[in-house]
Image (cartoon, helix red, strand yellow):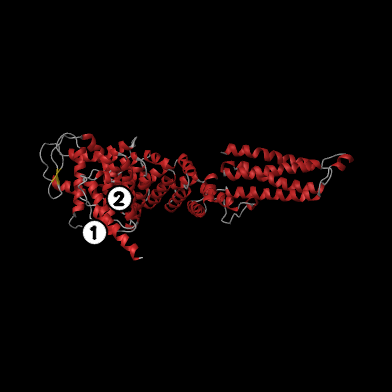
Amino acid sequence: MADLVKQILAKPIQLADHVIKSADEASSFKQECGELKSKTEKLAALLRQAARASSELYERPTRRIIDDTEQVLEKALALVLKCRANGIMKRVFTIIPAAAFRKMSAQLENSIGDVSWLLRVSASADDRDDEYLGLPPIAANEPILCLIWEQIAILYTGSPDDRSDAAASLVSLARDNDRYGKLIIEEGGVQPLLKLVKDGKLEGQENAARAIGLLGRDPESVEHMIHAGVCSVFAKILKEAPMKVQAVVAWAVSELAAHYPKCQDLFAQHNIIRLLVGHLAFETVQEHSKYAIVSQKATSIHALVLASNANSNAVASSNSNGSVNSAGPNVEEDKSRINHPLGNRTRSQFHSVIANTMAMNAVAKLPNGNAPVANGNGNSTTLPVAAAAKPATHHQHSNSLSAVHLKGREGEDVATKAHMKAMAARALWQLAKGNSPICRSITESRALLCFAVLLEKGTGEVQYNSAMAVMELTAVAEEDSDLRRSAFKPNTPACKAVVDQILRIIEQADTELLIPCVKAIGNLARTFRATETRMITPLVKLLDEREASRSNI
């Protein structure tokens, strides 16, 4: 960067020196040439100062300002060279209007102002004074551009608080006008915003992530961000940042995926799906620790699913002495129980269904041998199996790595947790849209159980985004027979739980959730037997009620 800026500045400095030398040799209009020489010397000093500070200069305004300055110096040189004409005939045929010197003097003054502004805006936080920088003369035709330059320069060199304020200013600009968002991207604002998301303070991270989400309003802009490394930065934040920042990042993921569906697979490759499901499962089902992310990086989504399944194997292999563990029923009951949102109350039939589903999934994933068996009360007893030392060790290591992070998440307030779930559901909704592999990853991670719980117990945005996510999952399953058979078997407790909640919402005729739930039932039509008619009655009733309301009008 420093070498590039020095190359940009080399020619204007040479031109300035040439103007100064030619002004000394002027044989006519000596006074006017002296004034031009004085201004050019001042401009040359600023250009040399910029060359010394080349490593700190912000490239985009540097190019624009130096290009304009170079054109001004070329015109000044041409004017001064005319004043060197010797001989009467040359002077007669060389016409120089008096207004030309006034115009050139004003242009040099503007260039001095532009370069001075460039040096001030590119200065570090310690060297920059607190005074308002103002707008340079170059901003006369496009003041917003210079405001964007100033905010981006602060993102590069400002203090943490100043960087946070600059990101907030860019959020306002991007929200107000799509063109301003384009300018922010074109002027190099994505990289410093991503750096602030990754390394800034809490407020700065939130503002920067919000700006990234607002900037991704078209495929070209999102593709630019993908090349800038937004996927890896967002994955890091969703793994270990404060929950408030994670919620904004999840929202930004949903925005980028909505405006550029091709980025869905790129997010999946960076573990975003599993991270979002982990946030969705946190305190939604008690086994949310299975969604904790370990330090070992997996090479695919399938590997991540296998990593989560290792926990089930570790539990089953913990008793390898060939006898029934006397504490097994209590332990397995604690493992499979879902926290009731209202406290320690008797579990409903719906919660028992989810508990049984978890037990059945554990049976499917265990090696040859005995496995947990559910009893009539929804509890389970562990029967002996062969020991599996490696999975058990991996499970213990995973818990130790994630303990601190889980403890931090548990300390968040209720509103923040609810907002995080809402944004995670929104991101999964957009990532699942029309993408069979991602839908398969989501359904294999027990997210359906989470959506069922949130549809039952969630409120507002959490419910709506969960309903939309289920609608998109079922829409893909309608076209993908393999996904439909694996994730939406009518006799599986997970599918039954989701369908029960959808039918409950349809029966209640909730205006906000009604459309996605009706669409979801329609998408699942192929999975229902001809004898199963429980969904017909609420749909016909709903249709009948709507016809009645129209007749009243």
Mark with earlier residue (1, 2) = 1
- Say which residue label 1 marks: 342
Residue 323, above or below 452: above
Residue 514 in the figure: left or right of residue 156: left
Query: Which percent across, then down, holds residue 74?
Result: 72, 41
Q: Residue at x 70, y 38 (%)?
A: 14
Q: Closer to the camera, 382 or 363? A: 363
Residue type, numbered disc 2: Lys
Q: Residues within 10 Å of mark 2 (few under 14, many from 20)?
A: few
- Say which residue label 2 marks: 407
Q: Closer to the camera, 158 or 388? A: 388
Residue type, numbered disc 1: Leu
Q: Secondary structure at mark 2?
A: helix
> Which mark's residue is nearer the viewer, 1 or 2?
1
Q: CA distance from mark 1 to mark 2?
A: 21 Å
> Residue reaching furthest bottom?
552
Q: Residues within 10 Å of mark 1 (few under 14, many from 20)?
A: few
Q: Is the N terminus in the top left, top right, bottom left or bottom right quadrant?
A: top right
Numbered tag placed on residue 98 in the rendering: none
Query: Which percent across, then down, holds residue 82?
Result: 80, 41
Q: Residue at x 60, y 50 (%)?
A: 120
Residue 334 in the figure: left or right of residue 551: left
Q: Closer to the camera, 258 or 285? A: 258
Q: Residue at x 78, y 51 (%)?
A: 99
Q: Are marks 1 and 2 in contact (CB under 8 Å)?
A: no
> Residue reaching furthest right?
88
Q: Is the C terminus in the top left, top right, bottom left or bottom right quadrant?
A: bottom left
Q: Is residue 409 visible?
A: no
Q: Secondary structure at mark 1?
A: loop
Query: Which percent across, then down, holds residue 502?
Result: 27, 52
Residue 49 in the figure: left or right of residue 383: right
